[in-house]
Image: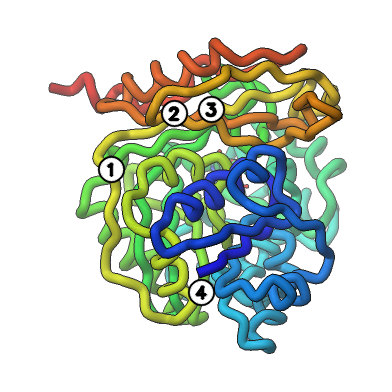
Amino acid sequence: MKVLVIGGGGREHALAWRLHHSPSVTKVYATPGNPGIAKIAQCETATDYVQLAEQLHVDLTVVGPEVPLVAGVVDQFRLRKLPIVGPTAANAALEGSKIHSKRFMEAHGIPTARFHTAATPAEATEALRAFRFPVVLKTDGLAAGKGVVIAQTPAEAADAIETLPCPLVIEEFLEGEEVSFIALCDGHRALALEPSQDHKRIFDNDEGPNTGGMGAYSDSAILTETQRSHILETIVNPVIHATGFTGFLYAGLMMTPSGPSVLEFNVRMGDPETQPLMLRLLSDWGETLMAAAKGALPSSIQWSPQPATCVVLASAGYPGANQTGQAIHLPEATPDGTTIFHAGTKRQGDHLVTAGGRVLGVTALGNTLPESIDNAYAAVAQIRFEGMQYRRDIGKKGLKRYNTV
Ligand code: AMP
Ligand code: GLY
């Protein structure tokens, strides 16, 4: 079959790469794609995705980013009976509006932090009285990871109220470990992918501002079977039953002492979580996605027991205004089990140059989590561009599971 991937970041490179290695897939297209994707897929520029899918006679389309989903790309494909993996615009509102998402969780008994909503700054100031510090303030709409402030003091909360666009969600601060739990849904049933953890802050030890994600690892040991079933029953299945959800439902969870609680829903795979997940996946991804699009998901898929780690290499200045156009030096080859996924890169003549905040996602398998971390950083050591910044501690929070023998 021929498959079209919508998007052009690291997540989409990983999706296209896994599809390229799927026995059922004869050709991969991507729009807009990127120079890394162009090595394994045909990249096309398009504004009308339906027209492109029809022109290319693709059998299946998979959507990477949230923006086209919220804009209704899945609804448009369904009108033309074109198979696609993703949620309808109505269901994408679980990510597109935090107020909708919180109210939905409240209505369906899905565990989430206690919250108030505020339509104006004055209402927000009033709502604060119902919370202790730290308190969390979130803008309602899509904000690419920049719409959340954790205020430690009343002064910080007042600042946040001034800068975040209204309406706002104000919610209780939760403590615990964060887990990315992603399930592929076919409208009736969910297939949980392996668990992963993101590293959202720019600096080591989770310091500095939030980013789109500076690295991620996936390791079976993150969640027990019992925890996975519990999350499916209390969080994912209620969404599917209430909405007929299709596509990827990503629950950003806080594992609190009283159980998993939803920090946010996303309606797509995570970036950079997808990169280690695609390295670990053994099943035919094309077949699995087609089954999801047809409402007939298999009950399980195969994963490598090996953990995988992805280290993001970012441009100087990221997540603020960043410098682009720097020449990128890559190794000629990478060892088996290591893949360099492109995110913000571009061809300039014969050169590969930086073209965004997050530039590359260096991803590696290993027999153990420490080995996968070492393998990823060994490849990082062979890559150079001016101003390159990255975290040195990706995956380290998972190591505690290896020290409990
Ligand atoms: P969100 O976009 O809602 O996932 O928020 C971004 C990040 O802010 C999350 O990954 C958490 O690290 C943090 N965060 C969000 N909500 C809370 C909360 N209620 N308690 C503690 N941390 C939170
Ligand atoms: N890695 C977090 C996200 O994709 O939203």
Question: Could you tell me if residue 126 is visible in this image?
Answer: no
Q: Label 4, secondary structure: give it.
A: strand
**Does residue 84 sit above or below 249 in this rendering?**
below
Classify 10 Å Cα crowding around label 1: few (below 14), some (14-19), many (20 and above).
some
Where does label 4 land, which residue?
246
Circle nearer the viewer, 1 or 2: 2
Left or right of 44, for residue 182: left
Give how far across and how far down residue 331 sits, in percent. Answer: 57, 17
Asked whether the residues under the numbered discs 1 and 4 touch, taking CB atoms below 8 Å apart as contact, a structural biologist would say no
At x 44%, y 70%, the residue is 185
Q: Residue furthest left?
A: 405
Using the numbered discs, state the Cα–Cα distance from disc 3 to disc 1 in whole angstroms.
Answer: 18 Å
Mark sitting earlier along the chain (2/3): 2
Disc 2 is placed on an element classified as strand
Q: Nearer the viewer, mark 3 or mark 4?
A: 3
Q: Can you tell me which quadrant of the image ligand 1 is in?
A: top right
Query: Label 2 near label 1: C-beta < 8 Å?
Result: no
Mark 2, residue position: 338
Q: Which residue is mark 1?
A: 304
Please say if the residues under marks 2 and 3 sit with CB atoms less than 8 Å apart: yes
| 3D distance between C-alphas at marks 2 and 4 | 31 Å
Upstream in sequence: badge 1 or badge 2: 1
Q: Which mark is residue 362?
A: 3
Q: Characterize the local packing of mark 4: few (<14), some (14-19) or many (20 or more) Cα atoms within 10 angstroms.
A: many
Residue drawn where x is 76% and y is 12% of the image: 386
